[in-house]
Image (cartoon, rainbow, N blue to C red):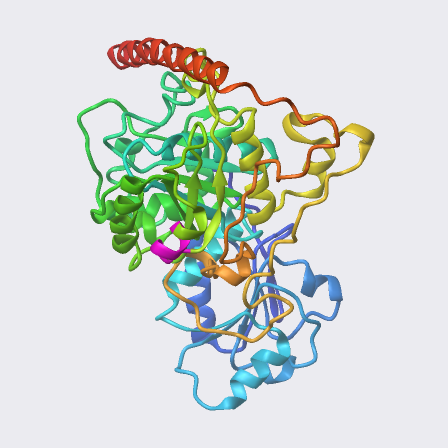
Amino acid sequence: MSRARPPGKVSGTEVRDEGSTGPLVITEDPELLDDILRLCAAAGVLPEVRHTAPERRGDWEAPPLVLLGADVLPRLAGVNRRPGVLVLSRVPVSGPGLWRHAVETGAEHVLVLPDAEEWLTDRLAEVAEGGTAGPALTVGVIGGRGGAGASTLACALALSSAADRRKTLLVDADPWGGGIDVVLGAERQNGLRWPDFAHSRGRVSGTALEESLPAAHGLRVLSWDRGDTHGIPPEAVRAVLAAARRRGGAVVVDLPRRCDAETAEVLRQLDLLLLLVPKELRALASARKVATSLAALAPDVRLLASAPPVPAATALDTAEMVRLLGLPCVGEVPWEGGLVRAQAVGRPPGSRGPLARFCQDFWDEAAPPQQEAHQRGRGGKRVRGGRARPARRARPAPRNSAEDPSPIAAGPRDSDAAHRTAGEWEFGSGTRVIGRRPAGAWPEGSRPARPGRAAAGMEHAREHMADEQAALAYRAAVREAGAHR
């Protein structure tokens, strides 16, 4: 049962809740005010209402969101710029006057009610849940062919994000995959799975979603179970993913290699989609079909080449793969032997080794972690020497931020999540190898000696046999876990 709110104070030209952290509303239009209060009640927030701008600077800058009526906008042209300012109107905007005043006040959007009511309710819901830092960076992973390692990479990316103390959710979007919680060893953890959300509609609380999911290795997991349910309605997928994005942080999605209604809904929510393609001819041919089917749904698709276990003359060149697929390249995932054996003994993928370094470099490029996370390093340990490891590049400011205050109309996606273009991600359109030691980086005399061809072949054969044995043990463990569940 929710705790009752203390009664608000009504005094002259303002309605204020004691200790309120709700939005600030400034308008003299009674009909517009009624609409705003109705939407605030639906989102579960209690606003502070004024007819004029606050006299104290702190009262203007403290609220997480400011809603300005178009009727008072001309009188607020001289206020200090701040993020989170929205202009509301009940009639369609016409003429340059209102837009000029909106730019002068630093407004992010100009919304016309009732058309933008759903979008505004979601934004108010973020305030109610404390999610004012912006939507989560949502990254999808899909294989160019079967067995490319997309699920392994998705788990590794999620673990690396959680290691940087970023709020992270790993989503399994493949009902035929057997459950990605098995890869993390969390199949017996208590919590809800996808079939439990089959009847979800409307707005799902992001906080309630986070608390209801299984936790493993510092992140939350939304997985399929081992039951007979093979799909849920697209409306439920939309509601759950919208709540996940409102949480902030990062959302990593493991996608199936097919495009039904549920998968299409997931693709529309992504900020970035990684197409993992092994450097072989058949995988490239399959990836072309996958890329063609994704082009109309995913906002930003990038190639991620997968290196072979040993250098081979038949391996494709990454630059040639970029040219044939027509996709910008994020980098090349290094080969890491022993992943199956590590999984069999309960060590999740990407916890250490070349794959872990690749994932760390990826997050440094896409979403640099907070400074305090760097100061303590991965796993909560302080970086050697006590100095913070600087991020390689600063994350670009989102569109319509303080540097670009020009207002735009709100889009249909959840909570102001603008699509990120290739230029904004700064990955570039050429080949980039991250997570691997570049050529010439070994100090003089310290490069390890390369084994002979015969010794390398014997070592590879031993690793292959050990992987096969570990795979058999792993499958037996999965069958046992499914029987228990």
Give the image location of residue 474, x and y in percent. Answer: 34, 13
Return the residue nearer the eye: 213 or 79.
Answer: 213
Start-end of magenta stretch? 321-327
As drawn, 157 above or below 391? above
As drawn, 261 above or below 97? above
Using residue 364 as the reference point, say whether residue 412 is left or right of it: left
Q: Residue at x 64, y 67 (%)?
A: 402
Give the image location of residue 373, x and y in percent. Answer: 68, 36
- Magenta span main SS: helix
Q: Quadrant of the C terminus?
A: top left
Q: Residue at x 58, y 33 (%)?
A: 357
Give the image location of residue 5, x and y in percent. Answer: 54, 45
Quarter holding residue 414: bottom left
Q: How many marks?
A: 0
Residue 322 magenta: yes
As drawn, 482 above or below 229? above
View extreme (right): residue: 385
Q: Quadrant of the N terminus?
A: top left
Return the residue nearer the eye: 459 or 250.
Answer: 459
Residue 75 magenta: no
